[in-house]
Image (cartoon, rainbow, N blue to C red):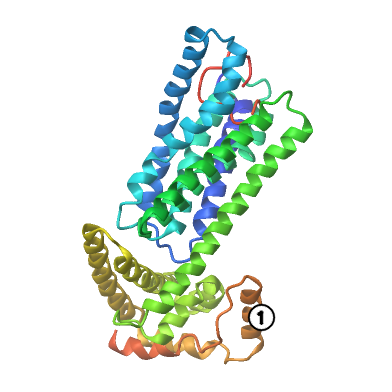
Amino acid sequence: MTWLTASFLVPVAVSVGVPAAFLYFVRRLDLYASGGFALVVGCFVAGLLAFPLSFAANTGALRLMTLGWGLSTAVALLAVKTSVAPLVEEVAKSLGLVYAVRRPDFTYFVDGAIFGFAAGTAFAIIENLFYLGNARDPLGMAVNRAFSTSLMHGTASALVGVALGRLRFGHGRQRFAALLVGWASAMALHMAFNRLVNSGPLTPAHLAGAIAIGIGGVVLTAACIFWGLREERAWLRETLGLGVGVSAGEANVVHRMADIDTLLAPIEQHFGAERRKQVQRFLQLQAQLGLKTKGAALAADPKLRAALEAQVADLQAQTDALRRAVGLYCMSYVRSILPDEGEPLWDRLNTALAQAGTAEPSMNLWQSLADRTGSGATDAGSGPTLPDPRPEA
């Protein structure tokens, strides 16, 4: 089947676009934008490279079982799919994460979840395209895999990323135990998924189960990120305003980053999109300043601590420059158009935050900020990355 026909371009678009859309959604959950975008790209590229590495390892295992051990092709292929491939692929996908976790831009396990999901998504995209070549129903395969296998790959790698994030600031033997648990969880999820979709003909029940695992995995990844954001907010309460050039009022604004689009909409309306971006960037930099300050305090490695302290100094300089660039008039205007404490908007915001488990005390959001500006499967399943003698894998 040629890749140039219009009927085949749609399955390709689904195979690439749907997993990429879920990755965008997961990335957007990071309210503080603490993880460097370059590391997201780097982990994505590492996930792409993990595919040929896994292909070679899985193919070698298949040949060993058939030629060396005398197993039939069908038996060996099933063994590789359900036992070997989950182990090989989770290790291969995590190689980029092992590098990323040592970088100063890696802040906490929220970053690990996002970086891991990026690596798993990249791997899944290449695997999807690999299997489209021999598919009898390319569009059906693309849709099934996009909402099941692709999301499973992202979730499994995200679990490893979370474990690596905990490892970075952990102490003693427990942090290594957490890493082993993360890897074991990823492999167990992958193995269970592969056994489900390769246990026989792909019935509607099997397909529903595969999609449930995929969607459930995204929910699990989001839950890990929200858990991490909650701990990061505790870090911000501890660090912001303690000798890092951020007032208590500014710190409280940062705590409401979940409402940033609503709060900054009037800025864009009256001052333009560029000024609104400056204000949002200012708040994100302050959040990163607090997180990096806490990270430097927790870092056991002297080199890593020194790198984080350098980032703290750079972030302080950037926030001072942005504070001056935003200007007193803009901040004063923002303070004047927001309702006072206790008005219905605040009540609605507090209710929504409480339902999400992130309620913060009411306050005049911009008062301090303005004051300071004066100073500045077969078809659905996860096939292993190896040649399959059947017409469709």
- Residue under label 1: 348
Q: Position of residue 360 (x, y in %)?
A: 55, 80
Q: Quadrant of the N terminus?
A: top right
Residue 4 visible from this viewpoint: no
Report whether 321 appears left or right of 91: left
Q: Nearer the viewer, residue 228 or 75?
A: 75
Q: Nearer the viewer, residue 220 or 27?
A: 220
Q: Quadrant of the C terminus?
A: top right
Taking the spot 68% from the left edge, 37% from the top edge, the residue there is: 210
Q: Position of residue 384 (x, y in %)?
A: 54, 26
Taking the spot 61% from the left edge, 72% from the top edge, the residue there is: 357
Q: Quadrant location of residue 258?
A: bottom right
Give the residue furthest to the front. Answer: 173
Residue 43 visible from this viewpoint: yes
Q: Quadrant location of residue 72?
A: top right
Q: Mark 1: which amino acid?
A: Arg
Q: Is residue 91 above or below residue 367?
A: above
Report whether 132 appears left or right of 272: right
Q: Is residue 223 above or below residue 118?
A: below
Q: How many marks?
A: 1
Give the residue furthest to the right. Answer: 204
Q: Position of residue 126 (x, y in %)?
A: 49, 31
Report helix, strand or loop for mark 1. Answer: helix
Q: Nearer the viewer, residue 307 or 159?
A: 159
Q: Position of residue 369 (x, y in %)?
A: 40, 85
